[in-house]
Image (spheres, rainbow, N blue to C red):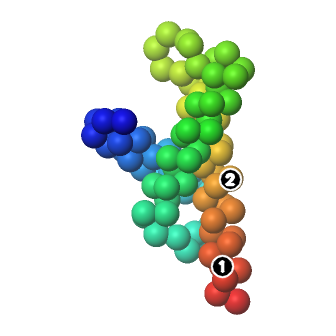
Amino acid sequence: MTIESILGAIVIGAVIGGLGRLLLPGRQPIGWLLTIVVGIVAALIGTAIAQVMGVATTRGIDWIELIMQVVLAVVGVGIVAGLKRGSRA
């Protein structure tokens, strides 16, 4: 694992996590660091699912893979926000 791949994962995680948070209605009581972590996990899982389905080898932008990653980020942000709200009660 190189510095470039780690920085790339952080940037992609921030974008995917931010899109997931943006698309989830309502307010999420989680910070930006947790949003990035959720985005990184969603990007990794989405890529793995796309590879299993055979859609990760398309030419150009992998729209199906990107959509899977963002949907997983929305679900992940929702779960983490719900857990965070539940711990305050």
Q: Which of 24 and 13 is in front in this view?
A: 13
The Cα–Cα distance between marks 2 and 1, rounded to whole angstroms, is 15 Å
| Residue placed furthest toward the top | 59
Q: What residue type is labelled 2?
A: Val
Q: Position of residue 54 (x, y in %)?
A: 67, 16
Give the quarter of the image for residue 25: bottom right
The quarter of the image holding the C terminus is bottom right
Using the rendered image of the protein, determine whether residue 8 is visible from the camera's viewpoint: no
Secondary structure at badge 2 equals: helix
Residue 49's place in the image compared with 22, above or below, is above
| Residue placed furthest toward the left | 3
Residue 32's place in the image compared with 36, above or below, is below
Q: What residue type is labelled 1?
A: Arg
| Number of residues whose C-alpha sits closer than 10 Å to that of mark 2, classed few (under 14), some (14–19) or many (20 or more) | some
Give the quarter of the image for residue 28: bottom right
In the displayed structure, does residue 84 sit left or right of residue 18?
right
Q: Position of residue 30 (x, y in %)?
A: 52, 70
Q: Position of residue 27 (x, y in %)?
A: 58, 70
Q: Residue at x 60, y 49 (%)?
A: 73
Residue 87's place in the image compared with 36, above or below, is below
| Number of residues whose C-alpha sits closer than 10 Å to that of mark 1, classed few (under 14), some (14–19) or many (20 or more) | few
Using the rendered image of the protein, determine whether residue 41 is visible from the camera's viewpoint: yes
Q: Which mark is residue 85?
A: 1
Among the two numbered marks 2 and 1 on one chain, the one whose residue lies closer to the N terminus: 2
Q: For mark 2, what is the residue?
A: 75
